[in-house]
Image (cartoon, rainbow, N blue to C red):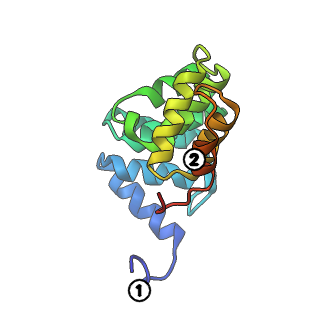
């Protein structure tokens, strides 16, 4: 029932995030960073997002590494740099974080920021798929169907393409 008893107030939420972020709390830096590209309670500012995510990354917050990687991959708030994005996705503990695995798989698929490697991409998609990430399940199903990075496997292609969160 998180938040069900409280009125939705983006400005107040951003103000509270800012207060905690100024005290150096990495989750608050990440949360406030999320507010800026969306204009949620603050003036839209993608560069401020990058600054906040960078602060949280320096403290080792895994989700901030993924979020900052997405900024660099898409050139949001910074100059697009696929090598930096790929480097962030590869860091511990992101190697077990489904969204980062899927993003890194995409980097390997097209050789974005690294040497193209379909085998490594398929392995990452499967790891993310096994954690329930729907996009990765679909993509790994395609890998199996087309034999990209793995052998042709119609059974796995169907099985992964039809998975839904919570179903195995």
Front residue (pair 123, 103): 123
Mark before the other along the chain sequence, 2 or 1: 1
Which is more foreground, mark 2 or mark 1? Answer: 2
Instruction: Inspect this view and state whether residue 139 appears.
Output: yes
Q: Indicate the position of residue 75 as horizontal and vertical percent values.
A: 66, 32
* Residue 115 percent coordinates (x, y): 59, 13
Q: Residue furthest bottom?
A: 5
Instruction: Give how far across and how far down residue 166 sits, in percent.
Output: 46, 63
Helix, strand or loop for disc 1: loop
Camera-side residue of 62 and 146: 146
The residue where tag 2 is placed is 137
**Crowding at label 1, few (<14), some or many (≥20) Cα neighbours within 10 Å?**
few
Q: Residue at x 55, y 60 (%)?
A: 164
- Which residue is denoted by mark 1 in the rendering? 5
Looking at this view, is 49 or 111 the one in front?
111
Q: Is 167 positioned to the left or the right of 80 in the image?
A: left
Is residue 100 visible in the rendered image? The answer is no
Q: Vertically, is 134 above or below 99?
A: below
Give the residue displayed 64% in from the left and 31% down from the top. Answer: 152
In space, the residues marked 2 and 1 are separated at their CA atoms by 36 Å
The number of numbered badges drawn on the structure is 2
SS of the residue under disc 2: helix
* Residue 142 image point, x, y percent: 67, 39
Q: Is residue 141 above or below residue 83?
A: below
The N terminus appears in which quarter of the rendering? bottom left
């Amino acid at each position: 029932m998180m938040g069900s008893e409280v009125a939705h107030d983006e400005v107040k939420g951003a103000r509270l995030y800012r207060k905690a972020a100024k005290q150096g709390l990495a989750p608050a830096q990440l949360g406030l960073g999320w507010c800026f590209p969306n204009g949620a309670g603050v003036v839209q500012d993608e560069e401020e997002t990058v600054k906040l995510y960078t602060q949280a990354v320096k403290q080792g917050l895994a989700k901030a590494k993924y979020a900052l990687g997405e900024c660099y991959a898409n050139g949001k708030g910074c100059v697009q740099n696929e090598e930096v994005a790929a480097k962030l996705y590869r860091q511990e503990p992101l190697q077990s974080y489904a969204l980062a695995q899927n993003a890194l798989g995409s980097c390997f698929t097209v050789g974005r920021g690294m040497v193209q490697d379909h085998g490594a991409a398929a392995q990452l998609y499967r790891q993310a798929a096994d954690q329930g990430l729907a996009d990765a399940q679909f993509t790994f199903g395609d890998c199996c169907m087309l034999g990209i990075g793995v052998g042709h496997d119609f059974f796995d292609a169907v099985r992964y393409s039809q998975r839904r969160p919570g179903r195995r």
